[in-house]
Image (cartoon, helix red, strand yellow):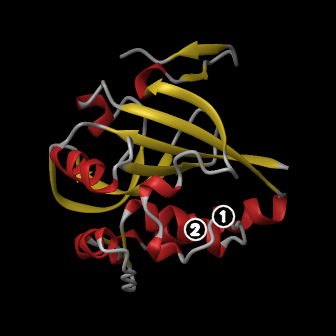
Amino acid sequence: MKKIYIVTTYTGTLLSFLIRKISKSPYAHISLSLNEDLSPMYSFGRLNPKTPIFAGFVEENINEGLYEIKQNALCRVYSLEVNYTNYEKLVKNIMKVNHNRRKYNYDVKALVYLSFNKAREKEYRYVCSHFVADMLYKSDIHIFDKPPALTKPEDFYNNKNLKLEYEGLLCDYPSQGKEGMLSQATC
């Protein structure tokens, strides 16, 4: 068995505030990591941490980009055990998006659709929750009873299939140090 990590965050940006308000969930953004130290996390979000205008497939890190600017980002880190076959499928699916990242865009219209519980599936377009749910679904990892395009950030919050590993500031998340010792990221 292998562990994967699903990270829910709230940064306090205007967009995350609006998503939080509409969804009534404490966390507005979802990322997926294949590593316990969360390096990197894969998602759909800002390509430039200073502006939400340009968004798409991103590799996020705890102390870089938007999380460097928003050091008070709150998070919940969940783990999920998957078998080796599903893990390899997940890696392959994420790398397929990564290698074709220029084709992919953030789907702003999907945010509106989701607020009315409507699915919007457009080729090469995702929001963060749809991306993570779709990568899991395409890898035969089924944790939802709904299509990936209808998955919202709040569907990850307290999901019975996920094990809560950490809750607090993302910059305080325990990560592996150079010697393999557990260390703290510094805000």
CB of mark 2 within 8 Å of CB of mark 1?
A: yes
Which of the two residues, 111 or 64, is positioned nearer the viewer here?
A: 111
Number of residue marks: 2
Q: Residue 135 — which label?
A: 2
| Residue 90 image label | 1
Q: Is residue 23 visible?
A: yes
Which quadrant would the C terminus be assigned to in this image?
top left
Please name whichever residue, 164 or 53, is drawn nearer the observer in this view of the structure. Answer: 164
Q: Position of residue 9 (x, y in %)?
A: 40, 40
**On the image, which quarter does residue 149 sit in?**
bottom left
**Label ID, residue 99:** none
Mark 2 residue type: Met
Mark 1, Cα crowd under 10 Å, few <14 / some 14-19 / many 20+, is: many
Q: Tell me what residue is drawn at x 53 percent, y 52 percent.
A: 156
Residue at image position (25%, 49%) is 21
Mark 1: secondary structure? helix
Q: Where's residue 102, x and y in %?
A: 33, 72
Q: Residues within 10 Å of mark 2 (few under 14, many from 20)?
A: many
- Name the spot of residue 85 as percent of width and height, x first: 82, 65
SS class, disc 2: helix
Tell me: 62 left or right of 111: right
Residue at (60, 70) in percent of width and height: 93
Quarter-wise, where is residue 61 in the image?
Answer: top left
State whether residue 65 appears in this view.
no
The residue type indicated by label 1 comes to: Leu
- State left or right for residue 87 relative to residue 91: right
